[in-house]
Image (tube, grey):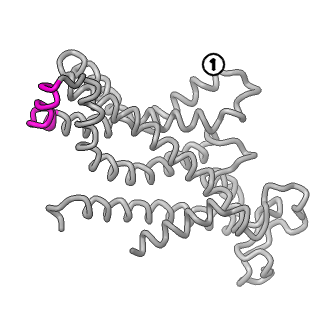
């Protein structure tokens, strides 16, 4: 329940950031450069106007966290949906059709498992930056990031769905559907698919936290979202430049927000796994 409450608070703060954030940190017309490096309100030199302090450009840290979490969550959710659709589709086809197609898909999955997901995401992002025009990099950076994270994470869904499909395809309701003349695609998507989705929902919840961390890692390395649309990873990278000079709040608070968000989603995924598994009740 605590994880669910934290998740609701984090997601609500991100989604409703334009209405609940104290300031709009990305509106250059409202920024005051002389307010840069203002410490948190409870420390010496702080002010109640900036509860968590400001960065080098005078942007309110609390507001940047809310707006940055919007991008982190959007990239995480979109990449999870993409990898889930891709993995579930390939796993369902591999498990139901079998034969050489099954072997081909699973060998690709085995090869991908030998590479770290972050390395695959970096490779896809690098290829996209080389192939696509330089002037369009910032406009499509988020879409490339979603593609990179999604492609690097479809294997877990495919292997799980394939294993469940191998069990389901031999059951009586599938044989009955064949007898009455239902097509192969209809049997797969209307009969087998609903019976193999339970573990997929758990994987998706846990994978959301992994996707957010991957996005933060890529943005921290400077290959994620553009600086004009900073996520939590970008905020941590920017704050890291001032950490040794004493402005610790610029990187500590975005880092803490990322930890709380990922931890709450992970705990929520663990609870969902226990709730959907009768053997663990």
Q: Residue at x 62, y 67 (%)?
A: 253
Compared with 247, 179 (above or below) is above
Whether residue 24 is visible to the viewer of this picture, yes or no, is yes
User: Closest to the observer: 241 or 110?
Assistant: 110
Camera-side residue: 230 or 95?
95
Q: Quadrant of residue 163?
A: top left
Q: How would you rate the neighbour count of disc 1 (Cα within 10 Å): few for under 14, some for 14-19, many for 20 or more?
A: few
Q: Is residue 51 left or right of residue 199?
A: right
Q: Is residue 34 magenta?
A: no
> Looking at the image, which residue is at 21% across and 29% down?
95
Task: Please identify the quadrant where the N terminus is shown.
Answer: bottom left
Residue 48: image location, x then y, percent: 78, 81
Q: Residue at x 62, y 55 (%)?
A: 70
Residue hosting label 1: 131
The residue lying furthest to the top in this view is 100
Q: Position of residue 54 (x, y in %)?
A: 77, 67
Residue 100 coordinates in the image, percent (x, y): 21, 15
Left or right: where does residue 125 sit relative to residue 273?
right
The quarter of the picture where the C terminus appears is bottom left
Which secondary structure is most common in the magenta stretch? helix
Q: Position of residue 52 (x, y in %)?
A: 70, 73
Look at 20% across and 27% down and name the residue there.
96
The span shown in magenta is: 166-180
Front one among 142 and 54: 142
Please state if 119 lies on the left or on the right of 14 as rendered.
Answer: left
The kind of secondary structure element at disc 1 is helix
Q: How many marks?
A: 1
């Amino acid at each position: 329940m605590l994880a669910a409450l934290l998740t609701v608070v984090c997601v609500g703060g991100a989604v409703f950031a334009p209405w609940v954030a104290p300031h709009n940190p990305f509106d250059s017309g409202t920024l005051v450069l002389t307010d840069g490096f203002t410490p948190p309100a409870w420390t010496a030199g702080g002010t109640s106007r900036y509860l968590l302090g400001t960065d080098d450009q005078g942007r309110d840290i609390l507001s940047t966290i809310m707006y940055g979490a919007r991008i982190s969550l959007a990239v995480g959710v979109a990449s999870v949906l993409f990898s889930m659709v891709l993995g579930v589709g390939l796993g369902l086809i591999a498990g139901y059709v079998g034969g050489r197609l099954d072997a081909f898909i699973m060998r690709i999955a085995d090869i991908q498992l030998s590479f770290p997901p972050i390395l695959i995401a970096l490779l896809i992002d690098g290829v996209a930056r080389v192939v696509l025009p330089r002037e369009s990099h910032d406009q499509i950076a988020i879409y490339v990031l979603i593609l990179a994270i999604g492609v690097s994470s479809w294997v877990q869904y495919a292997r799980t769905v394939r294993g469940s499909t191998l069990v389901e395809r031999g059951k009586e309701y599938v044989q009955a559907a064949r007898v009455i003349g239902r097509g192969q695609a209809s049997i797969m998507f209307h009969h087998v698919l609903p019976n193999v989705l339970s573990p997929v929902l758990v994987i998706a919840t846990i994978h959301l936290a992994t996707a957010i961390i991957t996005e933060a890692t890529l943005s921290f390395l400077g290959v994620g979202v553009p600086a004009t649309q900073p996520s939590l990873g970008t905020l941590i990278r920017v704050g890291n430049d001032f950490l040794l000079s004493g402005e610790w709040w610029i990187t500590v608070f975005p880092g803490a927000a990322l930890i709380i968000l990922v931890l709450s989603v992970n705990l929520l995924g663990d609870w969902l796994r226990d709730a959907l598994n009768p053997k663990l009740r």
